[in-house]
Amino acid sequence: MDEIEQQVLAVASATGVPFEQFPCDPELADTAEFCEHYGFLPDDSANTIVIASKGESPVYVACVVLATHRLDVNGAVRKRLGVRKVSFSPAEVTAAVTGMVMGGVTPFGLPESLPLWIDSAVMQRERIVVGGGSRSLKIVGSPEMLVALPSAEVVEGLARQMM
């Protein structure tokens, strides 16, 4: 287990909400492949997506949305950030901001200065699976574990269900 995974597990444990560590093949870490191979429903899979404002001094936010939903980047996210333009953070920027690689980004262990917005639909699930800090670990548990994080905020309408 690497250092970032240990940090992620320590933060997840500190929430006091029970969870399960779920090791996975790094080649199968992307949501669709993971769900298909390991038998998880996409409805129970939540992705952590880093969004950046455009401009000289970018502002970042981490958003947690169900795999069956599309983040409203140019609507809800842009308006909440109070900026003119936003975009999905590229993989190398996400890694620099979070210390985690795409396919492993998780709400646990993010920098305290990074806001964490959770789409309200995530909170409706009995359990969710999120990244574990690397492409070889997932965390499975109640979405209550997310709202126990200090920078977490549940946001109504952050994402829309895909048809």
Image: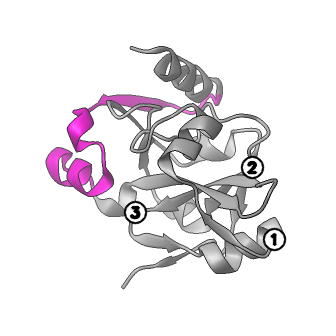
As drawn, the label of residue 67 is: 3
The span picked out in magenta is 15-40
What amino acid is found at the position of numbered circle 1 in the picture? Val
Does 14 appear above or below 93?
A: above
Q: Secondary structure at mark 3?
A: loop
Does 70 appear above or below 96?
A: below
Q: Residue furthest left?
A: 37
Q: In terms of image quadrants, where is residue 58? A: bottom right
Does 4 appear above or below 41?
A: above
Quarter of the N terminus within the rendering: top left
Residue at 75% x, 49% y: name it: 115
Residue at 69% x, 40% y: name it: 148
Mark 3 or mark 1, which has the lower sequence index? Answer: 3
Q: Secondary structure at mark 2?
A: loop
Residue linked to disc 2 = 115
Q: Residue furthest bottom?
A: 163
What amino acid is found at the position of numbered circle 2 in the picture? Pro
Residue linked to disc 1 = 83
Residue at 21% x, 52% y: name it: 33
Residue at 24% x, 52% y: name it: 35
Give the number of the mark in front: 2 or 1. 1
Instruction: Kindly report the distance in space between the C-alpha atoms of the residues bearing marks 2 and 1.
Output: 15 Å
What amino acid is found at the position of numbered circle 3 in the picture? Ala
Instruction: Kindly report the distance in space between the C-alpha atoms of the residues bearing marks 2 and 3.
Output: 20 Å
Q: Are marks 2 and 1 in contact (CB under 8 Å)?
A: no
Residue 43 location, x and y as percent? 36, 63
